[in-house]
Image: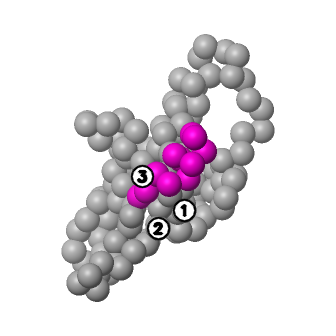
Amino acid sequence: MIIAKALYGLKSSGAAWRSTLAATMERLGYRPTQADPDVWIKRASKQDGSPYYKLMLIYVDDVLHIAGDPEEDMAKLDQEYRLKDGVGPPDKYLGGNIERVQTKDGSVAWSLSCYDYLTNAI
């Protein structure tokens, strides 16, 4: 996300941003999980009618959306806040590299590695 005016000097800035984003998430139909308030959950249905949960993992201004149709809710979020990298498949989250991989049995999964994070740390 691109923040037009940063007020990092204020002690309440982090809490104000979190409160603003929480209100947006609730308008989109999400609620925070009991285990982690930065993991937001929403009931949804697959095309065949079977139920599942959409998840949004949010840490400050880093968002990872896990859903059958992630573009829908991410586009709504992009209307509220201009997303820096736009809407699309993830390639990074919290400094880690994310990529789609095909497993030995032929199924597709997402992988998280720390290659770039460690390279930049060294």
Q: Residue at 67% of width from left, 58% of height from top?
A: 85
Q: Quadrant of residue 108?
A: bottom left
Residue on which disc 1 sits: 91
Pointers 2 and 3 in contact (C-beta within 8 Å):
no
Horizontal side of residue 111 vs 116, given as left or right: left
Query: Which of pointers 2 and 1 lies earlier in the amino acid sequence?
Result: 1
As drawn, the label of residue 99 is 2
Tell me the CA gap for discs 2 and 3.
17 Å
Please, what is the three-letter code of the amino acid marked with disc 1?
Answer: Asp
Tell me the CA gap for discs 2 and 1.
6 Å
> Furthest-right residue in view?
4
Tell me the CA gap for discs 3 and 1.
16 Å
Residue on which disc 3 sits: 56
Coloring applied to the structure: one colour
Q: Residue at 57% of width from left, 40% of height from top?
A: 121
Is 105 a magenta residue? no
x and y percent of residue 97 in the render?
A: 50, 57
> Furthest-top residue in view?
11
x and y percent of residue 48 in the render?
A: 26, 83
Looking at the picture, tell me which residue is in the foreground, 71 or 60.
Answer: 60
